[in-house]
Image (cartoon, rainbow, N blue to C red):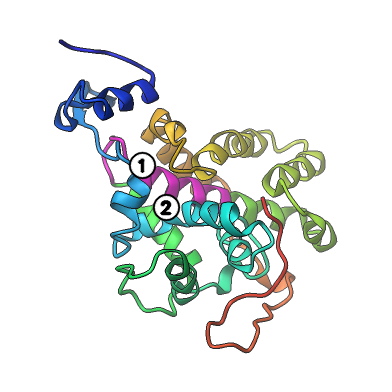
C-alpha cells in the first residue's frame, strides 16, 4: 500500500501507530531538474533526538537557539535573562555582536546537562558564526534541511535588521522598540524611503518568510518542512547582494556586562 499526503501530522501518525516503518517514510523533493524521493529525517522530534545531542555541528547549534529559547519561555518566562540573551541572537540588539559561544554554552547547559557542545573557541562571536554557517548552507543541495532553513532564516533577518537600522539612523526610535522589531523597522524604512521599491519588496519577503521558520517548537515544526530550501537560499543570497548591511555598531552604546564569571548579558531586551 502506498499512502500519499500533504498533511505532516497524518504522515507522522502513520509511523507512530505502526502503519509504516520509519525507513518507509519518504518525502518528495523538487529541484530544477527533477523530483526525487528521500528518506525522511527528523520525524521524531529532531530537536532532542538529533540537534541537542550533536552541538558540535554548527548548523544544529545555531538552529537550536530558538528551540532552547522556546523551552525557557515555557519554563521561566520572557523576562528570564537567558531568554533575553537568546533573543539578542534572533534580533539585532546592543549586545548582539558581543555574545560568545561561551555565553550560550552556559545557557544551553542549564537546560540540557551533559551536552556535547561545539569545540570551537569559546570566545567566538555567535553573530559571526551565524553568518559563516549561513554562507555554508548556500552550498547544500535541496532537501528537508531543517537546521539549514533555521540558520538561513536567522541570518536573513539579522542582515535585514542591520540594513534597516543603518538606513533609518534613528537611535531613539530603535531603542524604543519593545516587540515586533523587524516589522516596525520595515514600517519606518518604508515611510522614509518610499522610492526604494526593490529594497522594500525584498524586506517584505523577509517579514513574510522568516518568522515561521524561527518561532518553532517540537510540537509544531511543519512550516520548516513546507518551506522550499531553494527559496530561503535565494532570499539570503539576494539580501547579501542587494543590501549594504554593514552594521555601524558605533551608533549604539557599548555592551554593559555584569562582572560575573558566566559573563551573561544583563541588558533588558524585548521578548519578541
| Residue 201, quarter of the rendered image | top right
Confirm whether the magenta stretch covers residue 215.
no
* Res. 53 visible in picture: yes
Q: Furthest-front residue in view?
A: 17
Above/below status of 39 relative to 103: above
> Residue 10: x and y, percent?
35, 20
Task: Decide if residue 244 is in sight here.
Answer: no
Q: Specify the segment rendered in magenta.
A: 140-158
Lateral position of residue 265 relative to residue 126, left or right: right
Q: Quadrant of residue 93?
A: bottom right
Q: Mark 1 points at which residue?
A: 146
- Residue at screen point 83% across, 56% down: 173
Which quarter of the rendering shows the N terminus? top left
Q: What percent of the width, then of the height, locates residue 183? A: 71, 42
Q: In front here: 48 or 263?
A: 48
When the figure is inspected, residue 43 is found, relative to residue 86, above or below; the finding is: above
Answer with mark 2 or mark 1, whichever residue precedes in sequence. Answer: 2
Figure quadrant of residue 23: top left
Q: Depth check: give the residue in front, 218 or 89.
A: 218
Q: Residue at x 64, y 57 (%)?
A: 77
Q: Name the residue under label 2.
A: 63
Q: Where is residue 51 in the image (x, y as percent from the top left)?
A: 33, 54
Question: In the image, residue 247 lies at what x, y percent?
Answer: 62, 63
Q: For this view, does 28 lie left or right of residue 215?
A: left
Asked if 219 appears above or below 156 in the picture, the reply is: above
- Residue occupying image coordinates x 33% and y 67%: 115
Q: Which of 214 and 173 is in front in this view?
A: 214
Amino acid at each position: 500500500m502506498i499512502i500519499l499526503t500533504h498533511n505532516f501530522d497524518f504522515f507522522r501518525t502513520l509511523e507512530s501507530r505502526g502503519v509504516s516503518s520509519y525507513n518507509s517514510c519518504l518525502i518528495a523533493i523538487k529541484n530544477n531538474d527533477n523530483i526525487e524521493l528521500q528518506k525522511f529525517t527528523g520525524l521524531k522530534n529532531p530537536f532532542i533526538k538529533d540537534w541537542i545531542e550533536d552541538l558540535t555541528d554548527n548548523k544544529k547549534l545555531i538552529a537550536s537557539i530558538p528551540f532552547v529559547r522556546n523551552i525557557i519561555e515555557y519554563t521561566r518566562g520572557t523576562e528570564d535573562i537567558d531568554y533575553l540573551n537568546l533573543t539578542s541572537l534572533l534580533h539585532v540588539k546592543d549586545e548582539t555582536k558581543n555574545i560568545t559561544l561561551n555565553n550560550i554554552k552556559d545557557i544551553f547547559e542549564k537546560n540540557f546537562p551533559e551536552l556535547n557542545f561545539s569545540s570551537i573557541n569559546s570566545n567566538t562571536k555567535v553573530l559571526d558564526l551565524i553568518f559563516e554557517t549561513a554562507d555554508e548552507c548556500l552550498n547544500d543541495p535541496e532537501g528537508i534541511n531543517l537546521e539549514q532553513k533555521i540558520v538561513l532564516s536567522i541570518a536573513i533577518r539579522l542582515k535585514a535588521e542591520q540594513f534597516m537600522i543603518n538606513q533609518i539612523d534613528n537611535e531613539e526610535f530603535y531603542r524604543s522598540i519593545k516587540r515586533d522589531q523587524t516589522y516596525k523597522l520595515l514600517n519606518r524604512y518604508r515611510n522614509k524611503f518610499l522610492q526604494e521599491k526593490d529594497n522594500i519588496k525584498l524586506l517584505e519577503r523577509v517579514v513574510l518568510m522568516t518568522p515561521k521558520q524561527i518561532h518553532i517548537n517540537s510540537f509544531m515544526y511543519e512550516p520548516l518542512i513546507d518551506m522550499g530550501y531553494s527559496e530561503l537560499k535565494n532570499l539570503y543570497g539576494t539580501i547579501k547582494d542587494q543590501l549594504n548591511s554593514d552594521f555601524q555598531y558605533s551608533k549604539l552604546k557599548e555592551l554593559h556586562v555584569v562582572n560575573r564569571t558566566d559573563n551573561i548579558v544583563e541588558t533588558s531586551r524585548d521578548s519578541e
